[in-house]
Image (cartoon, rainbow, N blue to C red):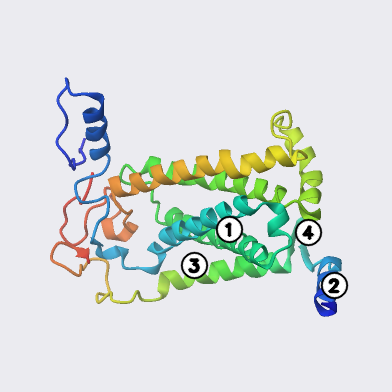
Amino acid sequence: MTTVPRAVAPPPDNASWTVRLRGRIGGLVPAGEALPDSQPSYVSSWIYVFGVLTLAALTIVLGSGIFLTLGGSAWWHVSSVGHFVNSLHLWSVELFFMFMVIHLWGKFWMAAWRGRRTMTWVTGVVAFVASIGTAFTGYLSQSNFDSQWIGAEGKDGINAIGAGAFFNVLNPGQMLLWHVVLLPLVVAALTVVHIVLVRRHGVAPPIDATGGDGHGHDPASGHPRRA
Amino acid sequence: MPLIAAFHTSAMAAAGHYLHWGAISVSTTNLLIVIAMLVLFGLALVLPFPGHRTTAHSTGDRADGCAS
């Protein structure tokens, strides 16, 4: 079993909780890999860009969403700036999903769960599912005829899976709070874990670059770049 | 304003165009978006990345195999 080289020395057993927490955080990613200034040569491909594009789109989604919460529906429905921010929120979500799905395609076809990256793959998949829920509650929170229609169409499906008792799509207040508090927290937390895992285990190499051994060997040096 | 009102009225009245293949039904807009994503995916695989001087995976930009 390989180990991840630590960024900081492990704390002694009798250290305070702050020292132990610092040591745990410092051991999350190998030394110098939290914000690396170089990548393996196989990363020089457009297919590796879509992960960070997804992250960039998510940043715009969250930023525009914060502005929408400040103004409220009476603002985003009637003012020109509100219309702009509302549109910015919508189209950044559209791009977020486009980039995320292309990122998913690329990682699926290169079997990116190889080399002890199972949890990286799993957190990405769960974040994708949570993002769908966040987008769904967003459509229900528009406070217009579209959101009413979606709620009316969706209620039977939600009830059919037994979730209607605590997830009522015809309750705009509940859907708005799921959309602006609960689900964004889930997506943000999963995104952070996903990125930490990517930095911890390194970017998944193409299958032909590793000879299919799945251990992330650097094709040029022949050594395992990371655990 | 009348132009904008007319646009909104026509946009809201438009039902959208759908394509059907048996059990599969998809709007033209969504189909075009899916096709655009597939094209983007294909281009990402074949287009050369700027600044990448090598042509094969087996050769790194630097002696340690890392691209800076």
In the rendered image, which residue does mark 4 sit on? B22
Question: In which quadrant of the rendered view does residue B50 lie?
Answer: bottom left
Which quarter of the rendering shows the C terminus of chain A? top left
Q: Amino acid at mark 4?
A: Gly
- Residue A214 appears in the figure: no
Q: Amino acid at mark 1?
A: Val
Which residue is farthest top?
A: A14
| Label 2: element kind | helix
Q: Earlier in the sequence, mark 2 or mark 3?
A: 2
Residue at 16% across, 56% down? A222
Residue B10: mark = 2
Q: Amino acid at mark 2?
A: Ser
In-front residue for pair A210/A62: A62
Instruction: State left or right for residue A165 relative to residue B3.
Output: left
Instruction: State left or right for residue A2 relative to residue A117.
Output: left
Mark 2 to mark 3 CA distance (whole Å) = 34 Å
Say if labels 4 and 1 share a chain: no
| Label 1: element kind | helix
Mark 1 to mark 2 CA distance (whole Å) = 25 Å
Closer to us: mark 4 or mark 1?
1
Mark 2 neighbour density, 10 Å: few (under 14) some (14–19) many (20 or more): few
Residue at 25% across, 77% down? B53
Say if labels 1 and 2 share a chain: no
Q: Are marks 2 and 4 in contact (CB under 8 Å)?
A: no
In the rendered image, which residue does mark 1 sit on? A93
Mark 4 neighbour density, 10 Å: few (under 14) some (14–19) many (20 or more): few
Q: Are marks 1 and 2 in contact (CB under 8 Å)?
A: no
| Label 3: element kind | helix
Q: Is residue A95 above or below residue A195?
A: below
In the rendered image, which residue does mark 3 sit on? B41
In-front residue for pair A171/A104: A171
Q: Residue under mark 4: which chain is it in?
A: B
